[in-house]
Image: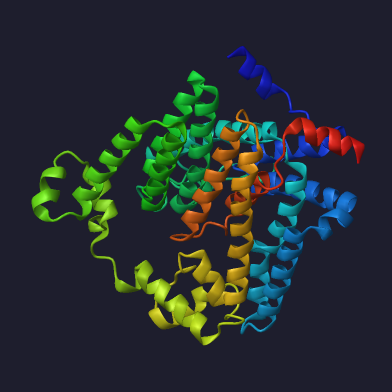
Amino acid sequence: MNRFSLEMKALQPHPDPNFQRHWNVVQIGLFLLPFSAFLGGTSILMVAIAIWVRKFSSLSREPVNRGFAILGLVMIAAAWFADDRANAFLGLFNFLPFFFTFAALADLIRSPKQLTQIAWIWVITSIPVTVIGILQLLNFGGMPSLLWGLISWKVFAGGNPVGRMASVFEYATILANYYAIVFILSLGLWLQERRKLLIGIVLLNAIGLILTNSRNVWAIAVLACLAFALYQGWKTIVAAVGAITGIILGAAFAPDSIALPLRKIVPRFFWARLNDQMYSDRPVNQLRSTQWKFAWNMTEQRPLTGWGLRSFARLYTEQMQLWIGHPHNLFLMLSSESGLPAAVMLYGLVGWIMAQGIWIWKALSPTNRPIYFTFWIAFLACTLFSFLDIALFDARINLMGWVLLAAIWKMEESGEWGVRLRGS
């Protein structure tokens, strides 16, 4: 425990001393990020700008960075053809700065030890986030403002929506995406280091993600547990998780002859949420299937350029008489608002990085593979989350996702990288 306290007091050294100051600022920014998009995000963006200034020539020659640059141009062109250009160009800020930041961070974060440090930073911040969320459900709320308004939280008493924990992220869905990341990181750290403190944090995060009442993050958490159990070769745990999942799904979706007995042992909180009986009177225009069909119809009408970023909400409101901010699927949002070429390019580039990650994992030493696997699974969780919901409109969650992607790209054994950088 003393060793842990010492580690968390000091900023981690960077493999290349020339980038120590940049890495220090990034570590501080990552710690502040869950609590302040301005403080955390601005710190990391400033480092990204500094790295681009120093390494523009090499960064601009890399194929993946060129791919994101081309994607950015495609999205700008699509915005130019939008009916509402102002809103479409405003929507670009949810993408272009993050492409830019990804390229810089991927060059800065290459050591497995850096991945461990990032994981510890975010896992530690999950403790106050969860405590605030639990207090919120106990009807403590408010809008505290710290540091002259640079940190401003909207903590709605009772949750937002009511009954669903949102904590400092204002809305339960955004908090759920946060837990998709920190729960996996805490679980991966515990499997790697086996510290008692981490058991408590894993359980705390598990309680938090359950209280978000998000079916999406529940499923992701179960899949993540199965992935780690398979990775560790724990067949008994795989069987146990599979059996528990089967019982819960049976209580939700099986015929009454099977479901009714299972519902005596499975809390209604779970099965009624999964099969939507908790909200059985939901209008058709609120269903995700309706939103997906609407978004695909938009795509079919303008497959190349889409209707412009931020256009779905306006068009859906006009036709369905209900405001929905996005179609709850990132691919469909992009295809309908920026066109199919942009959607395919984004998923193609990310898919390529994820695929290359398998080969990077194989090239790492057995000691460094677990933390890399953890980050790979954490980003995969973000990708899966985006198929049923979209949280990138919150800059904190958006940036966390890009940090994960940057961390699994260009990964090398720390010793070899340090020598190569100092000799370059």
Quarter containing the C terminus: top right
Q: Position of residue 118 (x, y in %)?
A: 64, 36
Quarter containing the N terminus: top right
Say which residue appears at 83% left-offset and 59% top-offset.
Answer: 61
Say which residue appears at 52% left-offset and 48% top-offset.
Answer: 169
Q: Position of residue 170 (x, y in %)?
A: 50, 50
Q: Is residue 206 above or below residue 359?
A: above
Name the one closer to the observer, 160 or 157.
160
Quadrant position of residue 94: bottom right
**In this view, which residue lies farthest toward the bottom?**
301
- Left-right relation of 193 to 110: left
Q: Is residue 175 above or below residue 75?
A: above
Q: Position of residue 354 (x, y in %)?
A: 59, 52
Say which residue appears at 54% left-offset and 27% top-offset.
Answer: 192
Quadrant position of residue 248: top left
- Left-right relation of 110 to 254: right
Q: Position of residue 266 (x, y in %)?
A: 21, 41
Q: How many marks?
A: 0
Say which residue appears at 69% left-offset and 22% top-offset.
Answer: 9
- Left-right relation of 151 to 105: left
Q: Can residue 404 be seen at all in this image of the molecule?
A: no
Q: Can residue 76 be seen at all in this image of the molecule?
A: yes
Q: Is residue 239 above or below residue 101?
A: above
Name the one closer to the observer, 89 or 237.
237
**In this view, which residue lies farthest toward the top?**
2
Name the one closer to the observer, 352 or 111.
352
